Amino acid sequence: MSRSSAPVLLARTIALNRLFDTYRGCRCCVNRAVGSAKISAVCAPRAATLLCLVGTLALSACGAGRSATKGDHEVQRVDTTISMQPVRRSAWSVCVQGWLLRPACPRSVPASGSSTTRPTVVAGCSGGPTMTDVPLASKRCRFAQWSYLTYGRPIPGAQNGIVVEASELTPPPPYFVHVLVYGTTDVSALGFALPRGRPTPLTDALLQRTNRRRAVLISRVRWAGHPGELILAPSFPGGGEMGSHLIFSYRTGRIYRGISLHPWPSVYRYRIDYNRVDRAVKLAPSPAYPEIETTLRWIVESSG
């Protein structure tokens, strides 16, 4: 599938994509709205997803860039340790329904830090001559995708207000977790070209670059017994739902598979209810990229 013939991918994930795209495009986060939504762990009900979407759309006027404010020099430090938790069996069973996905379905993901917030898990497949929606288990399936997204505990200091994100990236686990798995027999279905050439070392500056139009080859690695490549996806919106994700990409015969994780900054900046003062909280080690890469490897090693 080429850009010129892009299909209507994963019809059942439209609501989730709109929610996440609005979140990334406007860079806003609604802690209380999402935290209170009882989102189903498998194929989230449209009503619950729309509840999150409505809360996010209410913030659509927020600015796309950040300017220096008098609060920038005050950085709150919070000890945050990323831990892994098993993927709910109901969520994992959806992933393994897809023959293209099955070997890449992870059994562990970063913990969200909330026992009450249930993840939004959606999956679907496109196939057939016109790349329309087909069952995951169908042999006509040519591009399958499984998405696991959850919001955890509120950002420290932000329990009593709507958070307007000022950072280029979302906060780290346990505050925000987004993992994607894809499998395809047509690599062009990704929507962006896999990179070639020399690897580019991963840095926090590269992670937070917002105008990255092409995927970047980071390194060639061997994880979970698979020789593959570590790739940084194009920035949103060029990377689609995988925008800015760090991806472990590998090939088995004619099937291309990938497991990805949304990265985070070491210092997360935000505002409360549109006030003019940025707040900054150090939620991850500096630099952040080694921990991001390690977390993705944990996810990959749990797959299969």
Image (cartoon, rainbow, N blue to C red):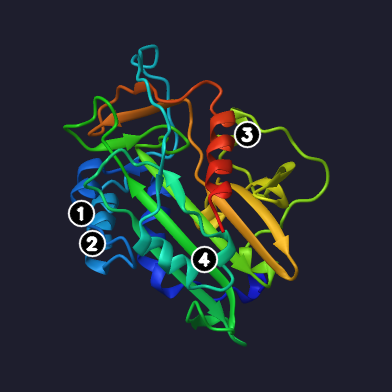
Decide: marks 2, 1 in contact (CB < 8 A)?
Answer: yes
- In the image, residue 297 lies at what x, y percent? 58, 42
Rendering quarter of residue 255: bottom right
Q: Mark 2: which amino acid?
A: Ala
Q: Is residue 131 left or right of residue 152?
A: right
Q: Mark 3: which amino acid?
A: Leu
Tell me how far mark 2 sits from mark 4, CA to CA. 21 Å
Q: Secondary structure at mark 3?
A: helix
In the foreground, 166 or 183:
183
Q: Secondary structure at mark 2?
A: helix
- In the image, residue 174 lies at what x, y percent? 36, 37
In the foreground, 248 or 34:
248
Q: Which residue is mark 1?
A: 37
Q: Mark 1: which amino acid?
A: Ala
**Mark found first going from the N terminus, 3 or 4:** 4
Q: Which residue is mark 3?
A: 206
In the foreground, 97 or 209:
97
Q: Is residue 214 left or right of residue 208?
A: right
Which quadrant is home to the C terminus? Answer: bottom right
Tell me how far mark 2 sits from mark 1, CA to CA. 6 Å
Q: Nearer the viewer, mark 2 or mark 4?
A: 4
Residue at image x 37%, y 18%?
69
Q: Is residue 198 left or right of residue 45?
A: right
Tell me how far mark 3 sits from mark 1, CA to CA. 34 Å
Q: Nearer the viewer, mark 3 or mark 2?
A: 2
Where residue 145 is drawn, which disc sits there?
Answer: 4
Decide: marks 2, 4 in contact (CB < 8 A)?
Answer: no
Tell me how far mark 4 sits from mark 1, CA to CA. 24 Å
Q: Which residue is mark 2?
A: 48
Q: Mark 4: which amino acid?
A: Gln
Which quadrant is home to the N terminus? Answer: bottom right
